[in-house]
Image (tube, coloured by chain):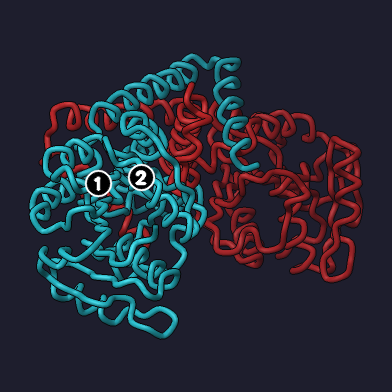
Chain colours: A cyan, B red
Amino acid sequence: MTFTHCSIVGLGLLGGSLAIDLRHHFPQMTLTGVARRRKTLEEAAALHSDGAPVFTHLSQEPGAVAGADLVILCTPVQTVMQQLADLAPCIAPGAVVTDVGSTKRMVMNAAATALPAEVFFVGGHPMAGSDRAGLLHARAGLYRGATWALCASAGAEAAAERLSGLVETIGARPLRIDADLHDRLVALTSHLPHVVACALAAQVLGDPQGELARAFIAGGFRDTTRIAAANTAMWRDICLTNRDNIVRELTGMIAALESWRDALRNGDVPHLDALLTRAHTLREDLNR
Amino acid sequence: MTFTHCSIVGLGLLGGSLAIDLRHHFPQMTLTGVARRRKTLEEAAALHSDGAPVFTHLSQEPGAVAGADLVILCTPVQTVMQQLADLAPCIAPGAVVTDVGSTKRMVMNAAATALPAEVFFVGGHPMAGSDRAGLLHARAGLYRGATWALCASAGAEAAAERLSGLVETIGARPLRIDADLHDRLVALTSHLPHVVACALAAQVLGDPQGELARAFIAGGFRDTTRIAAANTAMWRDICLTNRDNIVRELTGMIAALESWRDALRNGDVPHLDALLTRAHTLREDLNR
């Protein structure tokens, strides 16, 4: 059973790109956009797909989600948690509610507390994004080929199946997963790399010799630190809602760097070779 | 005064790409290629630029550098140090010798010991490369726009000026710099990021849940760890010839990650905001 009326709350890169894809694949769908800022709504009104406006309605009012059979929250994780409580009274019975936040445990808990039993929550997390935030960077096909994690809350199995179909239609790869495992895996593959890229960017570019050092910056450093330029509000929320997992991965990373430092300090060639070869082999394998 | 006969020793990505550019910009130049492996020489013989063979001569013998007024060593740093001693008796008086190695202090010291007074050594380091090594990846224009550090040894000022002109002709940006400062700056901008990318790649991809984690790997992780797939022999040499500087930068990085860990463990929002904002601002500035 497909959805007939979708409300997207939060019109940034993710919400905007999703709206464009939904309009393209479901031309008959009523599509309501909700955003806090008037300027965002003006940008959203200008959004077109296949020659038609992307949104059917645009509103600053949370009450605009009232008629929807699908509500998608596309705001940072801590805002999602607040919005679940604020929107709960407006959501139609039988509606499916999902989000696109980068951590899932705290959102699932907030949904269980805030939403009435006749509303079905499925936590969602598409592995897509960019270091360029905002509706102006929204584009068709952002989610194509991306893993889209779906965590069904108790009783929301059928809702998760419906969402799985929707996600597949726009070209993403739905992956049903438990929220605990999800948060552990993204700490490893996404949150740890982000913190590391931030620390590296700050150390190199903030160095007293930083200006002179720029002549020596090549593609390697740019690649390694690219994600440090991403939206800080989003990342603050991610960090604060996955603290335990990120702390554990950071402890592993610190130990690994200490091991490198020992190998270098001692001029331990076999150890250094082993460290370089292991990294090379594992990363090369990912290129295949 | 331009050079009339150039010997390139070591025909990998850097040596091969340099040969292609020299052939293009100096069609009259005698260009000798020296490599250890027969297969490499066969690949080098097949290399053409503007319809003509790139190399005038190819040889496995170090003695092939005898007639050159410019000898460019394009091998890993520790090999360069060995070759300086091996080639010294064959190099013509008055010749200029340079290299393209990623660290400069130890090479400069080795040259001072190995080369006779009538041969002029200028340490060189083009900030160009790729995670794809080998002659088969050599291409025209690899050095275009790249900073090319030049460290003149005592008495080699005129030689450095001549090299500076050569490097500019193929589109690179010569930068005269002291070897100590060079090694400190590349530890910061290149060697630290490399070690960090290796440690990160190994931790994530080597995790017991690594297979499942791959579904959650997106562009961010790929970018952040791309350089970990680079040539391990070259990086072993870089690490071993810049140990003190890399150890110092690693100590800074470990302290930075401990600071992030503290902020996360304590849920210290102002500290976390400050860390995220500083990284964002500095990295965003590099995009401009």
Q: Are marks 2 and 1 in contact (CB under 8 Å)?
A: yes
Q: Which residue has dot 2 on it?
A: A158
**Residue B65 position in % (x across, y down):** 84, 44
| Residue at 58 percent of width and 25 percent of height | A278
| Residue at 55 percent of width and 23 percent of height | A275
Residue A250 location, quadrant: top left
The crowd level at tag 1 (other Cα within 10 Å; few <14, some 14-19, many 20+) is: many
**Residue A104 position in % (x across, y down):** 28, 39
B261 lies left or right of A182: left
**Residue toward you, A198 or A64:** A64
Q: Amino acid at mark 1?
A: Phe
**Residue toward you, A260 or A151:** A151
B86 lies left or right of A21: right
**Residue toward you, A266 or A115:** A115
**Residue B113 position in % (x across, y down):** 65, 29
Q: In this rendering, do the residues under marks 2 and 1 share a single chain?
A: yes
Q: Which mark is residue A120?
A: 1
- Pick the quarter of the image with the N terminus of chain B: bottom right
Q: Of the residues under marks 2 and 1, which one precedes in the sequence?
A: 1
- Label 2 element class: helix
In the picture as drawn, the residue positioned furthest to the bottom comes out as A51
**Residue toward you, B166 or B35:** B35
| Residue at 28 percent of width and 75 percent of height | A55
Q: Is residue B278 above or below residue A42?
A: above
Chain letter for the residue marked with disc 1 in the picture: A
Q: Amino acid at mark 2?
A: Ala
Q: Is residue B174 above or below residue A60?
A: above
Chain letter for the residue marked with disc 2 in the picture: A
Q: Which mark is residue A38?
A: none
The crowd level at tag 2 (other Cα within 10 Å; few <14, some 14-19, many 20+) is: some
**Residue A145 position in % (x across, y down):** 52, 53
